[in-house]
Image (cartoon, grey):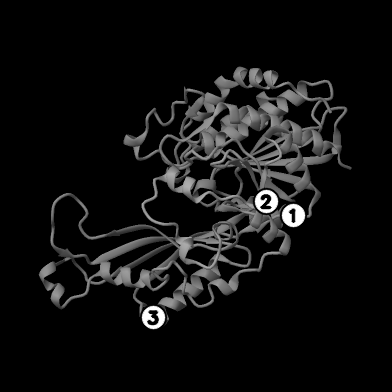
Amino acid sequence: MKEIAKAKIQATAEENQNLFFEYLRLESVSTQGRMISETAEFVKQLIEDFGGKAELLNDLGGHPIVYGFFPAGQKGNSEKTLLFYNHYDVQPEDPLEEWKTKPFEPTIIDGVLYCRGVSDNKANFMARLNAIQLLSESEEGLPCNVKFLIEGEEEIGSPTIDLYLEKHADLFKADACIWESGSKDSEERFTIDAGIKGIAYFDAWVESAEVDIHSSKGAVVDNAAWRLMHALSSLRTKDHQVIIDGFYEMMTPPTELEKSFVEKTPFNGEKLKENYGLKHPLIVEKLDRTPQEALILYPTLTISGLLSGYTDPGSKTVLPRKAQAKIDVRLVPGMDPENVYEVIRKHWDKKGFKDVQLKLLTGEKSFRTDLTDPFVDIVLNSAKKVYGEDVVLNPNSPGTGPMHGFGEHLNVPILGSGTSWAKSGAHAPNENIRLKDFYQGIEHMINLMNEFGLIN
């Protein structure tokens, strides 16, 4: 196992920067269907340009999935296969007025690279390709087989990926998987996630009349905005405790090992408030759980959007006839999106809100890797060689992705490692990564593949 010098890593990344920037310029916004086929073709070509074999899978509907394969070198371990999961789709760039640079024009300012999709998730894919190139060009060659699954629907809930995983399980068969996520926290500690929360995302709405009504009739007539507000407020107390019968009972209790890692997870509430400019206390201050437990082990229930009545400048006195809300519930093991729908529906029916409509738009189950799996130590040990001993392992991320299907259909341990940092701003204006983190991400992937190829 030969180490590759940091200067060589940076030089190679800089040589490939034009390709990286071409990738970033592709406006692959999945929710709007922008440049999806062009980006899928570009990703396929990238893999081939770096010496791999690639194929577009588009036989089950949805946006194309890109399959990539790089065989182990002559001195590598052809019995071991590492799968990388990435996605080429990105979030919309709005609000445009809050960007300091053009959203889809990669721009470097003081060592920080700004562009929509650079943090989530295009830089991680490029870091892995750079690592493969550097290892392939070394005397020992690539230490193991490498496969890629790069999808184009992650930002819209990955609605078709399980279909592809089930049908093409043999094609994506591997011994372990590195996920698309991973970053440094607010204290510059590198964080690895061994799982992910699921999600149940809902539309909720109610209609109180056939037309908007003059607000003077508010003395005798109810309106949709109040009606929906009361229904929503029945789901959670003002102290932020979910009060839906059966909600918490669905949770699978965490193992003692998982709880021990959660206890060791650092959390800096003051830094969090500073980073986001928070105006209110953290909600865990009134809950019977630590912030770490809340982020990793407990579900959430969030109102993500509200719309009703007149919202333009000036005044218009109406009783709105319709009110709508977006609700997202982050799920932990044991919770199923359909079951969450059922308990909310039963709760509203019981509370007298049968007229409030509820529709499950998308759902994904959660996943946690067995923390006793040997792959966990490989990822941790290889990271410590780059980031130092203070590497943090979370049993799962607070965020969501289609990890459950990988565990179900491929039966692999899955851990996330990436190139973001606490202020990368994924999904927000001025999304970015620091170049120094990008180079370290390449180095970590080199170390990881070297160590992974050694196991029998």
Say which element carries label 2.
loop
Q: Amino acid at mark 3?
A: Lys
What percent of the width, then of the height, locates residue 235?
Answer: 42, 71
Could you tell me how far apart the alpha carbons at marks 1 and 2 are, in whole angstroms? 8 Å
Q: Earlier in the sequence, mark 2 or mark 3?
A: 2
The residue labelled by disc 3 is: 351
* Mark seen at residue 371: 1
In the visual, does 141 lie left or right of 66? right
Asked whether disc 2 touches disc 3, contact meaning CB atoms under 8 Å apart, the reply is: no
Asked whether disc 1 touches disc 2, contact meaning CB atoms under 8 Å apart, the reply is: yes
Q: Nearer the viewer, residue 149 or 194?
A: 194
In the visual, does 309 lie left or right of 182? left
Residue 451, quarter of the rendered image:
top right
The residue labelled by disc 2 is: 194
What percent of the width, then of the height, locates residue 18?
Answer: 55, 20
Question: What residue lies at 56% left-to-right and 34% top-to-bottom?
Answer: 122
Q: Nearer the viewer, residue 181 or 269?
A: 269
Could you tell me how far apart the alpha carbons at marks 2 and 3 are, in whole angstroms? 39 Å
Please tell me how crowded label 1 is: few (under 14), some (14-19), or many (20+) other residues with Cα within 10 Å. some
Looking at the image, the residue that sits furthest to the left is 216
Nearest-to-viewer mark from 1 and 3: 1
Say which element carries label 3.
loop
